[in-house]
Image: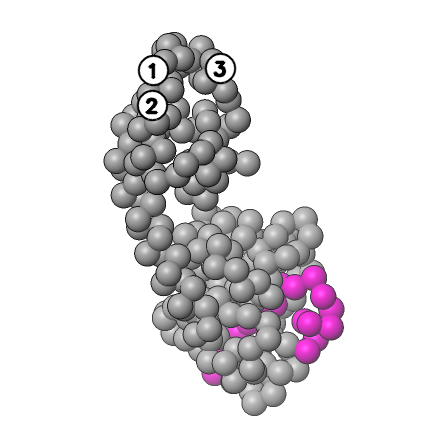
Amino acid sequence: MSIKVMIADDHVLMREGLKQLLEFDGSIKVIAEAANGVECLESLKTIKPEVLLLDINMPNKNGIEVLKEIRENDIDIKVLMLTVHNEVEYLLKAIDIGVDGYILKDSESAELKKAINYVYNGESYIQSSLIPSLNSRLVNRDMDKEKIESLTKRELEVLIQVANGMFNKEIAVILSISERTVKNHISNIFKKIEVSDRTQAAVFAIKNNLIQL
């Protein structure tokens, strides 16, 4: 029995090429296509593919947004992200939301088919070339988590305001504390998260999703 696949990608040639490649030996059948995120989600209301090949960069709704809606609405489908992005941050975001697999568009056809079979059978698949960077980032994220947990509730509030671009005087007013207390909190924050200035502190907060841009 063929694995039923849907391709969501805004490039017609990419969709056509993937369809020919995947259907070559009869083990995979492309039953639907979508040119953007909204079209993809609409199609999933009536069409029931088993694996979705999902591009990240699409108009209307990007792949990350589509993946999030799929998981929030408990749509029963395996999602394999197919993308040109080899930056680990995209991969981490997709993993956090619940992607089943992540593979680059420059991978060989054999690896793509392997990835489809893996996710179809309930296993996760991450392209091997991405794993060293992923492992390194996960280690760093665990370290960041420990740093965040070392902050007091008030220090976390101050850090968020710093990341929002507030000056000490503004933070003092917002939190109803003195400027001197704000200054002391910031000094402690810098030590705990191991940064040396407000810009680095803001980057730390953004990277760890303490604020939304």
Question: Where is residue 100 shown, x and y percent of the image?
Answer: 43, 64
Residue position marked by numbered label 2 in the rendering:
185
- How far apart are the alpha carbons under marks 1 and 3? 13 Å
Report if residue 12 lies within the magenta region: yes
Q: Which quarter of the rendering shows the C terminus?
A: top right
Please name the residue shown 46% across and 73% down the image. Answer: 129
* Figure check: 180 above or below 41: above
Q: Amino acid at mark 2?
A: His
Label 3 is placed on what type of residue? Glu
Q: Is residue 46 visible?
A: no
- Residue farthest toward the front in the current orientation of the protein: 196
Tell me which amino acid carries mark 1. Thr
Of 125 and 8, nearer the camera is 125
Helix, strand or loop under label 1: helix
Q: Secondary structure at mark 3?
A: helix
**Residue 196: % across, % down:** 41, 36
| Mark 1 vs 3: CB contact within 8 A | no
Q: Which mark is residue 106?
A: none
Give the percent coordinates (x, y) of residue 62: 61, 52
Q: Is residue 145 magenta?
A: no
The boundaries of the magenta stretch are: 1-17
Could you say whether the residue bearing mark 2 is in a helix, strand or loop? helix
As displayed, is residue 66 above or below residue 21?
above
At 62% across and 83% down in the image, what residue appears? 21
CB-based contact (under 8 Å), mark 1 and mark 2: yes
Front-most of residues 136 and 190:
190
Q: Which residue is mark 1?
A: 181
In the depicted structure, whether residue 13 falls above or below residue 154: below
The label on residue 170 is 3
Residue at the far bottom in the pictured view: 25
